[in-house]
Amino acid sequence: MAATLPRVRVVLFTGKGGVGKTTLAAATAARLARAGRKTLVVSTDPAHSLGDALGERLDDTTENEPADLGSGLFAAHVDTRVLLDDTWAELQGHLRTVLAGAGIDELVADELTVLPGVEDLLALAEVHRLATSGLWEVVVVDCGPTAETLRLLGLPEALSGYLERLFPAHRRAVRGMIAGLASGRTGAERSAGWDRTVDALDRLAAQLAGLRAMLADREETSIRLVLTPERVVAAETRRTLTALALHDLQVDGLVVNRVMPAPPPSLRGPTARWLRERHTEQQAVLAEVRAECGDAVPLATVPYTAAEPTGVEALIALAGSLYGTADPAAPGPATGPVLRLERSAGDGTSADSEFELALRLPGAADGPLDLTRVGDELVVTVGATRRRVSLPAVLRRCEVTGARLVGEGHATDLVVVFAPDPALWMRR
């Protein structure tokens, strides 16, 4: 019997550019390693500043393999150029062959196999490979700025749907069904070519399923949002919380970085006035964020340090001010399901039944919200973030009759009301 790998804890850090997420991710990893836990910190941020924060050269790391920094701490940058050449090229070649065999012009086929966001997908797949290798107890991920991270984290679900619509699993299972598209080859050649394509597609589907499972496992994976106590940054953080909730991803903490201390009462002059005004403004932003999140998302603060924390020892000291005696890898409080289905009228089988699908969507009232029914899916768009929600079987025979927002702040639900569609309800 194969040995079962121990569960790994994956913690992703993201935030608006310049708020210090790389430094805090590195500090968290350094603190965990110092506590005796074998820890990897890996960066998917194209800026590649993780090595600067650690005070180490990581650019010499080959083939994305992590560098051993000693004392149980490992670090790596994800080089998507290498992944594009090695991983995506094979599948792209198979797809190009199938499309060209179907009579599609070679140049058009080449364009159709250029998948938007594939670099982000490969970066996340590399994180998954490292996390499931069994080599580390904790993997800390320094993600790119929030906009890039939202695209990154939403890709597995979006691409799974895209792949299923383009090459459905039940058709892939019937090998050779469309092998004849590759005209000009013998039957054996066509069958072998399609088999190789199906194998590549199945590997991609399995990889996407693994990524989705890792991100959806709230005991294994969580996200920490880093912000500074400024209104513009806090506003982006609120939108990010909404977008992550829409993707059903767990945020287990907000980390407010660079909080100014209150100046002593004895300090006088223009500098003292500036410090007091800055401190007062920051505390007002902190109070607003705390009021909006309540107890749903823990909030921690990090003081503004006089010197920039670089190097492992400085990072460990910074982590001490953030975590105190707490475990940096401990998951946040358990949360309920993001989707809830309830019957609000009738007995569930009669034509006068009514159902309500509630989607937890904190902050949804602050931005533009759009709701569209597309076949058996509900397409929810909040701001620039969209998710296709697959409807439960009973709702596929219903029609949308209304929608409303219930609650406020972090406890806001989007409630969509469904009633039986007379044309479909009695079908079995």
Image: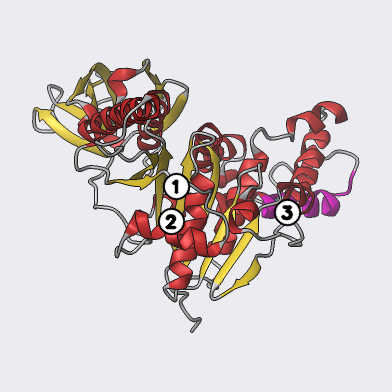
Residue beneath disc 2: 318
Where is residue 69? Give x, y as percent.
62, 70
> Magenta stretch: dominant SS?
helix
| Vertical placement of residue 258 versus 210, above or below | above
N-terminal-most mark, 1 or 2? 1
The local crowd at label 1, few if under 14, some if 14 to 19, many if 20 or more residues have their Cα within 10 Å, is few
| Vertical placement of residue 188 versus 179, above or below | below
Which disc, if any, is residue 289? none
Q: CA distance from mark 1 to mark 2?
A: 9 Å
| Vertical placement of residue 76 versus 343, above or below | below
In the displayed structure image, the side of residue 181 where residue 158 appears, left or right: left
Which disc, if any, is residue 195? 3
Along the line of sight, which residue is nearer the eye, 24 or 315? 315
Is there a contact, CB below 8 Å, between mark 1 and mark 2?
Answer: yes
Residue 105 visible: no
Q: Amino acid at mark 3?
A: Asp
Along the line of sight, which residue is nearer the eye, 159 or 267? 267
Residue beneath disc 1: 305
Where is residue 113? Give x, y as percent.
74, 35
Colour treatment of the image: secondary structure
Q: CA distance from mark 2 to mark 3?
A: 54 Å
Q: Quadrant of residue 73?
A: bottom right
Q: Secondary structure at mark 2?
A: helix
Q: Secondary structure at mark 1?
A: loop
Q: Amino acid at mark 1?
A: Thr
| Mark 1 or mark 2, whichever is nearer to me | 1
Q: Amino acid at mark 2?
A: Leu
Image: magenta residue range: 185-200
Q: Quadrant of residue 396?
A: top left
In the displayed structure image, the side of residue 185 where residue 361 appears, left or right: left
N-terminal-most mark, 2 or 3? 3
